[in-house]
Amino acid sequence: MEQLKTIGRELAMGSQGGFGQSKEFLDLVKSIGEARSKAEEDRIVLHEIETLKRRLSEPDIPKRKMKEYLIRLVYVEMLGHDASFAYIHAVKMTHDDNLLLKRTGYLAVTLFLSDDHDLIILIVNTIQKDLRSDNYLVVCAALNAVCKLINDETIPAVLPQVVELLGHSKEAVRKKAIMALHRFYQKCPSAVSHLLSNFRKRLCDNDPGVMGATLCPLFDLITIDVNSYKDLIVSFVSILKQVAERRLPKSYDYHSMPAPFIQIRLLKILALLGRDDKQASEKMYTVVGDIFRKCDSNSNIGNAILYESICCVSSIYPNPKLLEAAAEVISRFLKSDSHNLKYMGIDALGRLIKISPEIAEQHQLAVIDCLEDPDDTLKRKTFELLYKMTKSSNVEVIVDRMIDYMICINDNHYKTYIAGRCVELAEQFAPSNHWFIQTMNKVFEHAGDLVNVKVAHNLMRLIAEGFGEDDDTADTQLRSSAVESYLRIIGEPKLPSVFLQVICWVLGEYGIADGRHSSSYITGKLCDVAEAYSNDETVKAYAVTAIMKIYAFEISAGRKVDMLPECQSLVEELSASHSTDLQQRAYELQAVIGLDARAVESIMPSDASCEDIEVDKDLSFLDNFVAQSIERGAQPYIPENERSGMLNISTFGSQDQHEVSTHGLRFEAYELPKAPVPPRVAPTVSSTELVPVPEPSYSRETHQAAAASSVSDSGSSELKLRLDGVQKKWGRPAYSSSTPSTSNSTPQKTVNGVSQDVGSTVNSKARESYDLKKSQVEINPEKQKLAASLFGGSSKTERKPPSASHKVAKASSHATESSLVPNKAVVTTEVVSAGTNHQPPPDLLDLGEPSATSSAPFIDPFKQLEGLLDPTLVSSTTNNGASGSSNAPDIMSLYADMSTTGQSSSTGNSVSADGINAIFTSGFSTATSTDQGGVAVAQSSQLSKGPNPKDSLEKDALVRQMGVNPTSQNPNLFRDLLG
Amino acid sequence: MIRAVMVINTQGKPRLAKFYDIQAVEKQRELIRSVYGVLCSRADNVCNFIEAESFFGPDTRIVYKHFATLYFVFVFDSSENELAMLDLIQVFVETLDKCFKNVCELDMVFNYSKMHTILDEIIFGGQVLETSSTEVMKAVEEISKCSISFSLSECVCWRLPQMLYRLSRNLFRAGGVDSMEFEVIG
């Protein structure tokens, strides 16, 4: 009975293919399938390894058995266990004459060995022999092994044979030889550099398959060096044309598309060849256009080709017709229900947006849908797109979104990535320093340890230097708002180290600057930080230096300093610290407290972190002292290079060298330094340095000098941040755009500039609302707001900035002269607003609330201007908002405002998302139902095929018996495959 | 270039793993595990693509397809097209299905080397070799034919009934006996 069962099982196995295994193997798989835990599985596998080891050491193993053992070992190694004891047997098997055994040997060897394994040398000879074999199957097997096993040292051994095979009569062999050569090229380009012409030659192979195979290496070659392959453009285009026109044999069709993989490869190559080359691109336009027209957008592979065509179009010299076709395809992708197509659509949009930014606008709602999609991949792709289309006008919304997402993910790799993106965007496009600081706070708070330290230093510098304008009150305001926000945050548990350093530095520098907080309050907080993060020395160093600064400011202001008890104990603890850096800081603190107000004032002037510290490298202040000493009979200092005849112990000490030279060795202790160091230098350095690097003070000084020089020579643009965008946003628009020489700009011009801004804002709003009305009636207003804030001015901005602004300037000047009453009124209001902009700017910071009620009343008169004004939205509201906050008496309230609106809008969004989801799911369910229909059809067709139900029943029984996949009830596991 | 092909079942057990660039055994295992970790956390109605840079290094992505109890996973770089890779998975599975008739997980386990043979006819050294499942089948059949003759000459009595069955079927299909078979038997 048992035997019968076994025979039955073997029969069942055999009917599924010829490579059946023995019962032992089945039992192994079965027991692994049934293993309840990892440990149990490991035990089974280890047991199996032991068995195999024993078996392999037996003499005279039949080859069939050996083959099976090897397969079992491959399986074992796939499960992650070492099977190195059997490698030699695999190598031996490759020597066998029988094809099947040889193949098994090669399979095992390619899976076991890496290309630098010692055993490879034993195989090379076999491979050489097999490459010369008459049987093409043997040749193929050897070529297969070549790809994996040959490294740059062994390439020369097989290269001649492989090259010879390029002319083999079987196309399958030629194809594989080409690909093996390609593999050699990937591994070691220099070894095959003289053979690259072969790829060109094979491009003209009679067999389309071989031709297709040459495209892969050519693609790699062209990626590296475009220019030497420009001559092939015509051939590529004609091949693509022939393929697209179905001139290839039917057997190359896949899902009724002609040779899609060849088409894709060709489009990729054309994209490379046509980049920035108008002449080359013109040759491609027709064929790419044909593909757009002919491609079947219902099949997956058709869409793959369409996507590739979009990539090609966006890479080559732009052609309006093709761009139009591409935009059409993108909109089809984005409207599709399939997430895959949406993903491709978003990706394609990101490519096309560089050339024609206006197409983003049509798809704003689709993009927002993708952003709110639960699918992470899609969401990340959408962030990528948003990153590409970030402008000063939408940076706030985009970065807010990114931060929200960053907070809720756990994947550190991506978190680092997106935090970097946030920082980059914020540095590039920040509409205001205040916003920048808030954003950085959020990034630090949630991803602090993943952010580059440089970012923290930039932030500190920004707070210290302000934004380089003369407006001191704004700077002060900025700092006290930073202090407030840090005092709020500081109590939170587990802040990242980098962030704490920033906090400590800012609190030390500006904690009591505005007089709102007492020194004891701030120092208490700093002590808490040092205590709470007692194993982070850098933070402690920052904290103790900050405390020192606070006390120094207090003393120099003439107030009496009472050291808090916890502060006292902290200093005591640190002065006994293992870290010399901490010790030094603690001692410095104690020393500073002991000094009188005047001394402290000169050591530690308040708010002087940006002051230029002049380092007197020649120590000229000691000249008097030196002169006196010489008068009293001391020897003059002889520079090191002139001291040729003296004892050469120059490494010994530096200041005392002349004494050393007289005495030889000194055994008494060195005397204390006579305080030759200027009292100004050292402490000030420690107060202003940004990082407590444990390096000698010299490097600090240079660093400081560098920083200081950057401050001194520019005051405005030399911040390390890339503030060009900000500058434009910040200053009055006419300044930044027209002339750097600021004050010389004519009033007329200024008026134009400003009016242009305001006008365009309103204009864009009007247009937006019009667009939205037209397209989406039932879309949730919150979503529209988001769309407006994301896409609002963004896309049109870049269209033709120079010409547009020119036009606008003209238009508005025209408007000034025109006698139309409403226009005139408008212009006057503009002039007024421009005027107010000059002095205390009005509060126009309405960017946070996309509803923009303040500008709403202006819409009507501006509608008449709509025809005249080309919509340039270079800066719109942000400008005004920015200048508003630059004076900023009520910056905090503004911020509060913004944040509340932000919140409300986000909740609104979630609601709207739900709504959309509902629609979406219903749509999806219909889609799935049709899908099921398809499946059902497939099933019925399969059922009618014949022996299948019985087959599958048997299989099911077997499956249950083996317990491999106990969860599944369905015997026909891939039944839904061919639907 | 295609970096790796994996077939993992829904419980995380690898059924097939092939790396086209060299990876240490432990690293392979770790990669399989991390890929599985991502796959099993994904819902059904999301897209089939995943950014894979966090475990496969820069410029890598994953396309996967879920069939019954198995995930088919292809890892590749930007020189390939995502949708096309999705179709390549389809080609692979279609071929398996043709080869095994209603392929299921069990077939993969018991025909481990045949799986590799099929895969080698579709992807060669990390590049797409053939996308027509009929062509792939032809190539695989040709290799299998040798295996029958080998089995006959090597051991006649082992699993004889099965061999007879397969032989007759193959002869019927091929419409004659290939010269190669004579050679081997002789």
Image: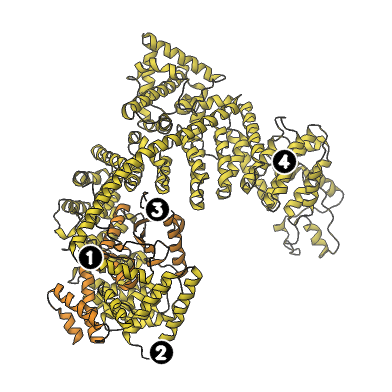
Dot 4 corresponds to which residue? A525
Q: Which of marks 2 and 4 is nearer the N terminus?
A: 2
Q: Which dot, 1 or 3, sits closer to the camera?
A: 1
Q: What's under tag 2, amino acid-wise?
A: Glu
Mark 4 surroundings: few (<14), some (14-19) or many (≥20) residues within 10 A: some
The chain coloured yellow is: A
Residue found at the far left of this picture:
B175
* Residue A58: numbered disc: 2
In three-dimensional space, the C-alpha distance between marks 4 and 1, rounded to whole angstroms, equals 77 Å
Protein chain holding label 4: A
In three-dimensional space, the C-alpha distance between marks 2 and 1, rounded to whole angstroms, equals 43 Å
- Left or right: A648 with respect to B18? right
Do the residues bearing badges 1 and 3 touch, measured as CB atoms within 8 Å?
no
Protein chain holding label 1: A
In three-dimensional space, the C-alpha distance between marks 4 and 3, rounded to whole angstroms, equals 45 Å
Residue A852 in the image, given as x and y percentages of width and height: 46, 23
Quarter of the rendering occupied by the C terminus of chain A:
bottom left
Protein chain holding label 3: B
Element carrying mark 3:
strand
Dot 3 corresponds to which residue? B50
Are dots 3 and 2 on a single chain?
no
Q: What's under tag 3, amino acid-wise?
A: Ile
